[in-house]
Image (cartoon, rainbow, N blue to C red):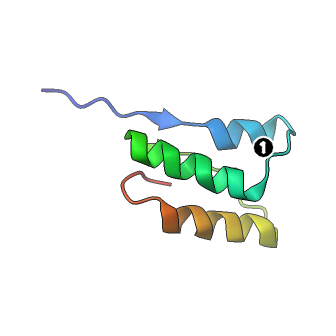
Amino acid sequence: MKKLIVNDTTIFSISRAGRRIAFKDRVEIARLLDVTGIDTIELPEFSGDKTEEILIKSVATVVNNATV
């Protein structure tokens, strides 16, 4: 049986569109995507901003199954 791999770009797309979403909401979105079985969660590119660094670390702590 073939495995379907699902890649979600919600958080990445929101950031690229220049839209603002609360930090805690980004982490919660990632957690919910992980719970629903998404295989890969894309985050915005890391540009060295301290907030982005904390976001990546925070998402990594709440995601148990997906690749970030």
Q: Nearer the viewer, residue 37 or 24?
A: 24
Residue at 47 percent across and 36 percent down: it is 7
Q: Percent from the top left, x then y, of residue 9?
A: 60, 37
Residue at 50 percent across and 63 percent down: it is 62
Q: Percent from the top left, x then y, of residue 68?
A: 51, 55
Number of numbered labels in the structure image: 1
Please, which residue is most extreme toward the left here? Answer: 1
Residue at 82 percent across and 68 percent down: it is 49
Q: Is residue 54 above or below residue 32?
A: below
Q: Percent from the top left, x then y, of residue 65?
A: 36, 54
Label 1 environment density (alpha carbons within 10 Å; few <14, some 14–19, many ≥20): some
In which quarter of the view is residue 13 placed?
A: top right
Q: Is residue 3 above or below residue 62?
A: above
Q: Does any portion of residue 46 appear in the rendered image?
A: yes
What residue is disc 1 on?
A: 15
Secondary element type, mark 1: helix
In which quarter of the view is residue 59 placed?
A: bottom right
Q: Does any portion of residue 39 appear in the rendered image?
A: no
Q: Nearer the viewer, residue 48 or 61?
A: 61
Q: Nearer the viewer, residue 21 or 53?
A: 21
